[in-house]
Image: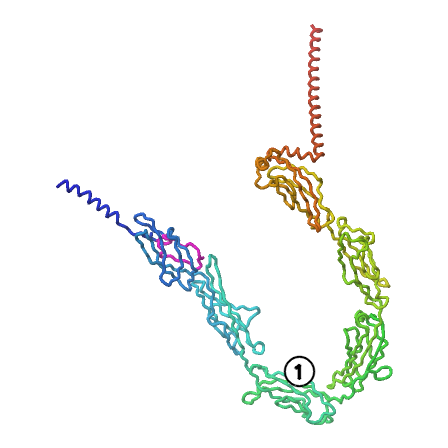
């Protein structure tokens, strides 16, 4: 039995272990610190100006068993989903724009799961304010009526504006926007609009005022910068009229006349007055104050002044009558009034109009013939004109006026009493032009000044102008542009010039001539103005393509004008492209192009624009050519001599190409040349290509040879000099040795 018990004990331990192994603890979020952005979003706040796409938070949690956790976000049904979470990293991103004024908090369900257990927590995210709202007016725009007698400094309106932001961004101050000094002022904090102290409204000056009010917030942070926002609205102030202005007369000063034929009861004059309070005017009553002498009356309602007696009984020539205009109140009483003076003059009957006279009596047509452009201030002495009015005094006073084209003439005198000799002077000599007017017609008008009849008289003045040679020929243009092909034969028509002289007869005849350094190849027909090339002229655009010279138009008295002629010789495609030699030799280093060049002697594009092409190459898959520059290069896939030899199956890297140069003219010309190209590797060819290139540069070869020979001669001279001085030195040493031996022998 003991053995059996011991056998059951390990089995029990295994069962306990299995039970504990299957136990699962739920994952959990880390606690949020006071400023932590890692946890479960609890106590988290976010500014409403946060940009969409910003990573705002990182969910952070763990699983007790060490299992990998996943994060999730959910919102209440019907709520806008402002955020999105990355399930693995827990990074939360803002995906919808926040607006604190619409929603100041967002409830979010955050979750964490290890795949078996899921923990969900409900958190509230507070949306913090940013200064993104402008003040909004609550009672504007508005219209208010204000009596013009409202006292200075009085309050007339209270502006109200609300800013939905908080803090300083939600505070509002008020300002007035005025281009000029205003009649109004506003309290910055309360918004109360007042009439400025010392100012008054005046209906008669301005019936309406438009006041622009600006509401500005106190500023606040938005997108990391301080921002101030404002709004504006207009207040319309209608000024209400008050009875504070007396009547005023219209059309003053007033002057009336009594004539010798006027009958008692005649209407002499009518005065008109209106209440100065135009908004609500009162009726007007008229009366005399003084000066009427009892011989005139005035209608109280209409203001008509009437003569009461016959003019023969009037004892004065001039009456100065004071007329009063009074406002009539609602109760019929007279109120404010205004006074003006009516001057009434007693005059005789005006029964004679002005009359013009010539040498033989009354005349209404005067004629004169004269040359154009007379000196200014000259008197037209051929006109004998007198004017007369047989009335007396003011009835015989009249003005003279000259009515006609422009202001060429002036009449003297301008004011006449009874009678005067009429003088007509030249005012504008230049305007009296035969080419514009062969004759001039004027009306001489005499009009009475102070008479009610304003009698008048007219006379026609006709001036016939004679022509003078006062104009030089004038070209139709200041310059002429012509184009002519270079192969045009001699005597070809180049261009036709035209000049006109408005003078008449021989003065209007024009002859043409040309001169200038560019005129040698051209001639002009003197009467027609047609310019030709000289019969022997041979135009060549390659030699000279531009000519300019002057053409002269001259009348019979030598008056002339000039115009400039510009002739362009048009290039024809008459030269084919040419290579320097028909057989060209080039050495090509692999990776670098060789260039051929042809020259086209034509003067203009496209005749001298050359295109290059390879006409023949064997094999034809080795070379390319740039059609514009003439650069010959190997195909892009050829990078070494070995590739060339593999393609061509030959070891000799020398080719002859037939290259064509063709111009773009019409018709097009072309020429060809044989190009022999030696190809070598870049490393080997640096030295050899230089010497290969010397075959085309005999001058350079001569210079190199001369340098080598000079160097050899210099080296030979230097070596010979050394050898010479060395032998001299040895001979000196030997001589000194012999002398010493002889000395020893002589001196024992």
Q: Nearer the viewer, residue 391 or 116?
A: 116
Q: Nearer the viewer, residue 436 or 297?
A: 436
Quadrant of the rendered image containing residue 313: bottom right
What percent of the width, then of the height, locates residue 666? 70, 51
Q: Nearer the viewer, residue 397 or 85?
A: 85
Bounds of the magenta span? 32-59
Q: Is residue 40 magenta?
A: yes
Q: Is residue 406 magenta?
A: no
Image quadrant holding the C terminus, namely top right
Quadrant of the rendered image containing residue 364: bottom right
Quick one: which residue is furthest to the left in this view? Answer: 1
Compared to residue 591, the image places residue 109 above or below, namely below
Q: What's the residue at 74%, 91% (across, down)? A: 260
What percent of the width, then of the height, locates residue 45? 39, 58
Q: Residue under circle 1?
A: 252
What percent of the width, then of the height, locates residue 182? 55, 71
Compared to residue 605, the image places residue 659 above or below, namely above
Left or right, 275 with reference to 716: left
Quick one: which residue is furthest to the top in this view? Answer: 748
Is residue 182 something that shows in the picture? yes
What secondary structure is marked by label 1? loop
**Does the magenta stretch mainly form a helix, a strand or a loop?**
loop
Q: What's the residue at 56%, 81% (across, down)? A: 279
């Amino acid at each position: 039995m003991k053995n059996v018990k011991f056998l059951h004990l390990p089995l029990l331990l295994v069962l306990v272990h299995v039970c504990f192994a299957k136990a699962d603890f739920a994952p959990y979020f880390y606690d949020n610190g006071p400023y932590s952005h890692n946890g479960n979003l609890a106590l988290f706040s976010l500014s409403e100006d946060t940009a969409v796409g910003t990573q705002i938070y990182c969910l952070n949690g763990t699983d007790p068993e060490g299992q990998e956790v996943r994060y999730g976000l959910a919102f209440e049904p019907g709520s806008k989903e402002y955020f999105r979470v990355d399930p693995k990293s827990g990074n939360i991103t803002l995906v919808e724009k926040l607006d604190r004024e619409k929603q100041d908090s967002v409830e979010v369900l955050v979750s964490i799961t290890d795949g078996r257990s899921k923990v969900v927590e409900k958190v509230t995210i507070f949306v913090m304010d940013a200064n993104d709202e402008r003040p909004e007016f609550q009672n504007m725009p508005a219209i208010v009526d204000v009596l013009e007698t409202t006292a200075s400094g009085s309050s007339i309106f209270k502006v109200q504006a609300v800013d939905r932001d908080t803090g300083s961004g939600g505070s509002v101050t008020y300002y007035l926007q005025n281009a000029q000094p205003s009649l109004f002022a506003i309290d910055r904090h309360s918004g109360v609009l007042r009439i400025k102290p010392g100012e008054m409204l005046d209906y008669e000056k301005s019936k309406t005022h438009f006041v622009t009010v600006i509401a500005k917030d106190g500023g606040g942070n938005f997108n990391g910068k301080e921002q101030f926002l404002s709004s504006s609205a207009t207040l319309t102030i209608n000024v209400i009229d008050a009875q504070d202005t007396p009547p005023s007369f219209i059309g003053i000063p007033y002057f009336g006349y009594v004539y010798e034929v006027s009958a008692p009861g005649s209407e002499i004059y009518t005065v008109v007055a209106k209440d100065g309070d135009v908004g609500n005017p009162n009726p007007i009553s008229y009366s005399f104050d003084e000066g009427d002498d009892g011989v005139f009356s005035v209608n109280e309602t209409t203001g008509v002044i009437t003569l009461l007696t016959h003019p023969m009984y009037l004892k004065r020539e001039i009456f100065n009558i004071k007329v009063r205009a009074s406002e009539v109140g609602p109760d019929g009483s007279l109120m404010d009034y205004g006074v003006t003076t009516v001057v009434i003059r007693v005059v005789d009957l005006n029964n004679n109009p002005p009359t013009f006279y010539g040498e033989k009596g009354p005349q209404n047509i005067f004629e004169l013939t004269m040359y154009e452009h007379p000196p200014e201030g000259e008197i037209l002495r051929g006109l004998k004109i007198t004017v007369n009015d047989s009335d007396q005094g003011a009835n015989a006073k009249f003005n003279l006026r000259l009515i006609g084209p422009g202001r060429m003439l002036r009449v003297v005198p301008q004011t006449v009493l009874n009678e005067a000799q009429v003088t007509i002077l030249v005012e504008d000599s230049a305007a009296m032009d035969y080419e514009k007017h062969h004759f001039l017609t004027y009306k001489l008008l005499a009009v009475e000044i102070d008479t009610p009849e304003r009698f008048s008289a007219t006379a026609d003045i006709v001036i016939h102008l004679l022509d003078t040679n006062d104009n030089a020929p004038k070209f139709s243009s200041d310059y002429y542009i012509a184009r002519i092909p270079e192969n045009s034969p001699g005597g070809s028509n180049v261009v036709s010039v035209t000049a006109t002289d408005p003078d008449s007869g021989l003065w209007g005849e024009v002859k043409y001539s040309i001169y200038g350094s560019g005129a040698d190849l051209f001639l002009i027909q003197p009467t027609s103005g047609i310019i030709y090339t000289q019969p022997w002229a041979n135009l060549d655009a390659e030699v000279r393509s531009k000519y300019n010279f002057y053409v002269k138009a001259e009348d019979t008295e030598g008056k002339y004008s000039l115009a400039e002629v510009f002739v362009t010789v048009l290039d024809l495609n008459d030269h084919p492209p040419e290579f320097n030699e028909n057989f060209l030799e080039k050495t090509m280093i692999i990776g670098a192009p060789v260039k051929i060049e042809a020259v086209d002697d034509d003067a203009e594009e496209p005749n001298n624009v050359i295109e290059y092409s390879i006409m023949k190459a064997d094999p034809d898959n080795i070379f390319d050519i740039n059609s514009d520059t003439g650069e010959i290069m190997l195909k892009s896939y050829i990078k070494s001599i070995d590739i060339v030899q593999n393609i061509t199956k030959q070891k000799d890297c020398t080719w002859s190409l037939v290259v064509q140069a063709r111009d773009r003219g019409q018709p097009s010309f072309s020429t060809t040349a044989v190009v022999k190209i030696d190809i070598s590797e870049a490393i080997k060819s640096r030295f050899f290509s230089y010497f290969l290139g010397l075959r085309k540069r005999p001058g350079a070869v001569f210079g190199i040879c001369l340098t080598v020979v000079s160097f050899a001669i210099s080296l030979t001279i230097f070596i010979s000099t050394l050898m010479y001085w060395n032998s001299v030195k040895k001979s000196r040493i030997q001589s000194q040795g012999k002398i010493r031996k002889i000395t020893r022998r002589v001196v024992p």
